[in-house]
C-alpha cells in the first residue's frame, strides 16, 4: 500500500516536472515572447527563469522517490519481466535509471546558466542543458508509464 | 559555487565515473532488497538480487566533487575559452556510450 502511494506521488511529481521543463524548453528555443492568442504562443510565453528552481526541486524529489521505490521494482517487476523474457522493457528501464543520474549531474550547470549568468553569450548552453534535462525527464516518464502498464507495483 | 568550469567538470566526471563504475562493475557496496541490507560484501545468490545503483551514484558524485574542487585551481580565463555548452555535449556523449552499452537488451543477444 505504501509503495503504491509512493509510486502515485512519484508519477504525479514527474507529470509536474514534465510540464515545467517543457514550458521552459519551448520558451528557451523560441526566444523572445511573441504576442498572440494561439495555443503555441501562450505555451512559449512564460518567464523561463522562474521555472528553474521548480524544475530542480521536482527533479530531486522524483529521483529520491524513484530511489525509494526502486528496490520494490527489482523484486516485483524486474523479476516478472525477466520471467516473461521482456528484455526490451528491462533495457528501457536500465537506460532510464542511468539517464536520470546524468540529468542529476547536469543540474548545477543547468541552474548556473538560468539563475546566475543569464547573459546572451550562454544562450546555446542554456538551450542544450534544458534540452538534455527535458529529454531525460520525457524518457523517464514514458518508460515509467509503460512499465507501470505492463506490471505495476 | 559560481564557477561554470568547475560545475561542468562536476557534471561530466560524475556521469562518466558513474557509467564507468556500471560498465566495469566497480561497486563499493551493494543493496540487497530482499533482506533490506546495505553491505560491502558480495553475498551468495540466496540473498537475492543485488543493486549497485546507489553505489555508482555515490562514487560518481564523490569523483565529480573532487574533480570540481581541483578545477577551481584552474584560472577562470582558461575556462572562458571553452564554449559554455561543452558540459551538455559531454553529457550527451556519456549518454550515447550508455545507449551503446545497453543496446544488447534490444538486440536480443
Image (cartoon, rainbow, N blue to C red):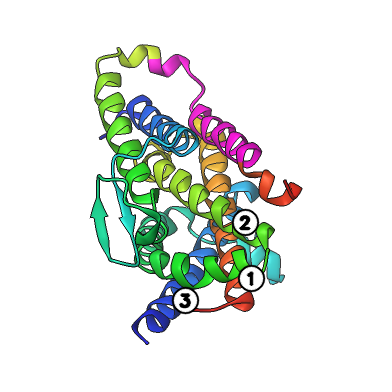
Disc on res. A12: 3
Question: Quick check: B95 above or below A67?
Answer: above
Q: Are marks 2 and 1 on the same chain?
A: yes
Question: What residue does disc 2 label?
Answer: A92
Q: Chain of mark 2?
A: A
Where residue A44 appears, as percent x and y from the top left, is 61, 60
**Residues under labels 3 and 1: Cα distance?**
15 Å
Residue B53 visible (yes or no):
yes
Kindly identify the residue that appears in the image at 38 percent across and 77 percent down. Answer: A6
Kindly identify the residue that appears in the image at 38 percent across and 48 percent down. Answer: B52
Kindly identify the residue that appears in the image at 39 percent across and 83 percent down. Answer: A5
Chief SS of the magenta region: helix
Question: What residue does disc 1 label?
Answer: A146
Where residue B108 appears, as percent x and y from the top left, is 74, 50
Q: Determine whether the residue tagged by mark 2 lies in a helix, strand or loop.
A: helix
**Residues under labels 2 and 3: Cα distance?**
20 Å
Kindly identify the residue that appears in the image at 72 percent across and 70 percent down. Answer: A38
Q: Earlier in the sequence, mark 2 or mark 1?
A: 2
Where residue A135 appears, as percent x and y from the top left, is 59, 52
Tell me where the magenta segment starts and ends, as one range: B79-101
Disc on res. B52: none
Outermost residue toward the bottom in this view: A1
Asked if the residues shown at circle 2 and circle 1 are in contact, with their CB atoms under 8 angstroms apart, the answer is yes
Q: Are marks 3 and 1 on the same chain?
A: yes
Amino acid at each position: 500500500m505504501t509503495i503504491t502511494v509512493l509510486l502515485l506521488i512519484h508519477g504525479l511529481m514527474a507529470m509536474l516536472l514534465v510540464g515545467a521543463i517543457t514550458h521552459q524548453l519551448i520558451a528557451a528555443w523560441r526566444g523572445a515572447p511573441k504576442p498572440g492568442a494561439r495555443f503555441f504562443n501562450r505555451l512559449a510565453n512564460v518567464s523561463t527563469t522562474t521555472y528553474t528552481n521548480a524544475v530542480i526541486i521536482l527533479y530531486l524529489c522524483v529521483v529520491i522517490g524513484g530511489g525509494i521505490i526502486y528496490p520494490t521494482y527489482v523484486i516485483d517487476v524486474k523479476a516478472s519481466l525477466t520471467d516473461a523474457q521482456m528484455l526490451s522493457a528491462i533495457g528501457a528501464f536500465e537506460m532510464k535509471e542511468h539517464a536520470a543520474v546524468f540529468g542529476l549531474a547536469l543540474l548545477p550547470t543547468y541552474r548556473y546558466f538560468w539563475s546566475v549568468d543569464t547573459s546572451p553569450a550562454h544562450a546555446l548552453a542554456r538551450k542544450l542543458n534544458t534540452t538534455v534535462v527535458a529529454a531525460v525527464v520525457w524518457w523517464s516518464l514514458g518508460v515509467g508509464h509503460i512499465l507501470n502498464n505492463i506490471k505495476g507495483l | 559555487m559560481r564557477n561554470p568550469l568547475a560545475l561542468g567538470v562536476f557534471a561530466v566526471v560524475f556521469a562518466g565515473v558513474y557509467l564507468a563504475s556500471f560498465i566495469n562493475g566497480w561497486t563499493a557496496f551493494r543493496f540487497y532488497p530482499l533482506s533490506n541490507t546495505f553491505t560491502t560484501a558480495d553475498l551468495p545468490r540466496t540473498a537475492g538480487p543485488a543493486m549497485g545503483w546507489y553505489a555508482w551514484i555515490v562514487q560518481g558524485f564523490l569523483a565529480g566533487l573532487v574533480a570540481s574542487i581541483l578545477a577551481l585551481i584552474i584560472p577562470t580565463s582558461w575556462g572562458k575559452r571553452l564554449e559554455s555548452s561543452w558540459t551538455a555535449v559531454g553529457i550527451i556523449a556519456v549518454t550515447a556510450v550508455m545507449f551503446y552499452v545497453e543496446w544488447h537488451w534490444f538486440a536480443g543477444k
